[in-house]
Image (cartoon, rainbow, N blue to C red):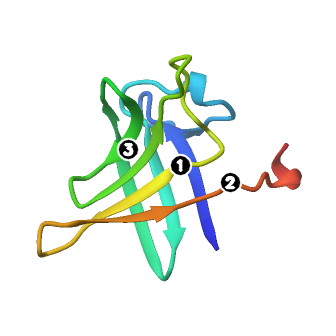
């Protein structure tokens, strides 16, 4: 199971965001998955909404309408060989936090 939370870091307050439209410069995502704990900074990209540290990337691709596909993000890992390992994800809403 993958757990994630996105936070804005405005003046060090680390506010949890409830909507991806609230993401500001300095935001980051915390991911706990497969015994790994990742903290990936927000990365401005033309074709996606992305968080990356150049070894890992959490990415929402854009639909034809130009909006991110929030239901099926991808977690990429850059392997030592230079290949990208793709880990497809399907988000399940946590009803406790809604």
In this rendering, the answer to whether 68 lies above or below 70 is: above
3D distance between C-alphas at marks 1 and 3: 11 Å
Dot 2 and dot 1 residues touching (CB under 8 Å): yes
Q: Which residue is pictured at 80% across the width and 55% down the height? A: 94
Q: Say which residue label 3 marks.
A: 51
Q: Earlier in the sequence, mark 3 or mark 2?
A: 3
Residue located farthest toward the front when viewing the structure as drawn: 64
In this rendering, the answer to whether 49 lies above or below 77 is: above
Residue 63's tag is none
Task: Give the quadrant of the N terminus.
Answer: bottom right
Callout 2 secondary element = loop
- Asked if one can make out residue 14 in the rendered structure from this viewpoint, the answer is no
Task: Give the quadrant of the C terminus.
Answer: top right
Q: Earlier in the sequence, mark 2 or mark 1?
A: 1
Q: Which residue is pictured at 12% across the width and 66% down the height? A: 82
In this rendering, the answer to whether 50 lies above or below 75 is: above
Callout 3 secondary element = strand
Q: Say which residue label 2 marks.
A: 91
Residue located farthest toward the top when viewing the structure as drawn: 65
Q: Which residue is pictured at 75% across the width and 56% down the height? A: 92
Q: Position of residue 63 (x, y in %)?
A: 54, 28
Q: Say which residue label 1 marks.
A: 73
3D distance between C-alphas at marks 3 and 2: 16 Å
Q: Position of residue 8 (x, y in %)?
A: 49, 34
């Amino acid at each position: 199971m993958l757990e994630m939370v996105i936070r804005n870091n405005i003046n060090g307050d680390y506010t949890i965001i409830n909507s991806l439209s609230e993401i500001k410069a300095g935001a980051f995502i915390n991911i706990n998955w497969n015994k790994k704990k990742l903290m990936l900074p927000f990365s401005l990209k033309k074709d996606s909404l992305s968080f990356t540290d150049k070894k890992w990337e959490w990415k929402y691709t854009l639909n034809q309408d130009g909006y991110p596909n929030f239901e099926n993000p991808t977690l990429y890992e850059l392997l030592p060989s230079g290949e990208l390992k793709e880990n497809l994800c399907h988000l399940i809403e946590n009803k406790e936090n809604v």
